[in-house]
Image (cartoon, helix red, strand yellow):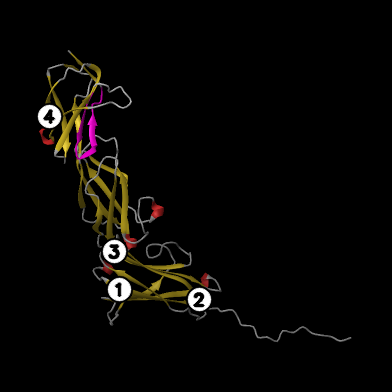
């Protein structure tokens, strides 16, 4: 009988017993003016063997500076507040408060290394962060609709920049002051930089161009000057200067006759209207307003700014009369009596 022994002569590598730094965080809070250092540390022998987690924090005035003096050194702790967040969660932390940080703006770099009770040490890990006062976003118009007809879609494209980077921009919103002196602000009034998927007409996502396609009400009786106010806000609450854009809505509104009035032939009746950004006004009337397609007869064309016309009521008697006013240059700018009136002898 031949005996064969199964012996593995290959050399086995002993598992490492060094502590491991899984991640390092260096975070500046614009709101609290504090600098937070943290490191997630593990050890093959268990957390209780970790002896210390040491940090060195360096500061320089600019990214190109050669000198990088030591600003602070010490140990990260895992004992909960105030320097740490959660006790014994393997995340070692240190909070540099606003008093210590003071006005020391600049570029900071931290190095972190962990040591255990057996004398083993981790690799040195490093992280960098800019500490600087927060700058508000800046707003620049790229394309703004300067006028619109009822039912048109208004287009606004704005470039938004921020010294802290595009990720610092929280929102770009707008409000509007209407011709009837009503100021409208709504949570849905915002511009998007999410690209086509955002649904607001933006073309390219995250390119710094914020867009909104705003439909107008085709049945609105408001005409005149609309003033839009745009504001960008960052994640720290700082706001840009307000961008003010004026948009004209030319049109006419008939104010009389609008009710079931009675007009008498050969008498004079004053037709009245309000208009904005049009020069002349065509006035017509119909005696078959109840028809599917009423036929209108010309009365006259006048200067729109007068606001009224004294009409000598004709002999055309009817119970289905209306007046229509319109801009001869743009026939879609028109208005018609809300209700029928009658003409009698």
Tag on residue 14? none
Tag on residue 308? 4
Mark 4 to mark 1 CA distance (whole Å) = 70 Å
Q: Nearer the viewer, mark 1 or mark 3?
A: 1
Query: Does the segment drawn in magenta span residue 328?
Result: yes
- Determine which residue is flagged by label 1: 107
Callout 3 crowding tier (Cα within 10 Å): few <14, some 14–19, many ≥20: some
**Which of the marked residues, 4 or 2, is nearer the chain's N terminus?**
2
User: Which of the 4 image quarters holds residue 10?
Assistant: bottom right
**Which of the marked residues, 1 or 3, is nearer the chain's N terminus?**
3
- Determine which residue is flagged by label 2: 19
Q: Quadrant location of the N terminus? A: bottom right
Q: Which residues are magenta?
A: 322-339
Q: Residue at x 52, y 70 (%)?
A: 47
**Which of the marked residues, 3 or 4, is nearer the chain's N terminus?**
3
Q: Which residue appears farthest toward the top when viewing the image?
A: 345
User: Which of the 4 image quarters holds residue 294?
Assistant: top left
Q: Nearer the viewer, mark 2 or mark 1?
A: 1
Q: Is residue 190 visible?
A: no
């Amino acid at each position: 009988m031949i005996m064969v022994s199964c012996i593995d002569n290959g050399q086995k590598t002993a598992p490492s017993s060094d502590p491991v730094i899984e991640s390092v965080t260096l975070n500046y809070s614009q709101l609290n003016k504090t600098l937070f250092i943290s490191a997630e540390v593990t050890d093959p022998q268990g957390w209780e063997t970790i002896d210390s987690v040491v940090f060195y924090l360096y500061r320089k005035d600019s990214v190109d500076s050669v000198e990088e003096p030591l600003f602070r050194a010490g140990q990260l702790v895992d004992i909960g507040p105030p320097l740490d967040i959660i006790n014994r969660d393997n995340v070692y932390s240190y909070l540099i408060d606003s008093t210590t940080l003071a006005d020391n703006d600049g570029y900071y770099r931290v190095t972190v290394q962990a040591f255990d009770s057996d004398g083993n040490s981790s690799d040195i890990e490093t992280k960098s962060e800019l500490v600087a006062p927060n700058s508000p976003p800046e707003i620049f118009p790229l394309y703004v609709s300067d006028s619109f007809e009822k039912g048109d879609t208004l287009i606004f494209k704005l470039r938004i920049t921020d010294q802290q980077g595009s990720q610092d921009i929280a929102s770009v919103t707008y409000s509007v002051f209407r011709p009837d002196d009503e100021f409208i602000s709504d949570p849905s009034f915002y511009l998007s930089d999410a690209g086509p998927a955002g649904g607001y007409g933006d073309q390219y996502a995250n390119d710094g161009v914020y867009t909104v396609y705003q439909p107008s009400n085709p049945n609105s009786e408001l005409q005149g000057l609309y003033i839009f106010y745009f504001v960008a806000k960052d994640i720290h609450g700082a706001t840009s200067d307000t961008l003010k854009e004026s948009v004209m809505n030319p049109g006419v509104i008939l104010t009389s006759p609008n009710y079931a009035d009675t007009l008498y032939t050969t008498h004079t009746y004053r037709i009245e209207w309000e208009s904005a950004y049009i020069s002349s006004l065509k006035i017509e009337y119909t005696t078959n307003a109840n028809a599917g397609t009423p036929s209108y007869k010309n009365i006259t064309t006048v200067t729109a700014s007068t606001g009224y016309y004294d009409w000598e009521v004709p002999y055309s008697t009817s119970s289905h009369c209306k007046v229509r006013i319109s801009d001869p240059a743009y026939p879609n700018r028109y208005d018609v009596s809300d209700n029928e009136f009658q003409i009698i002898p």
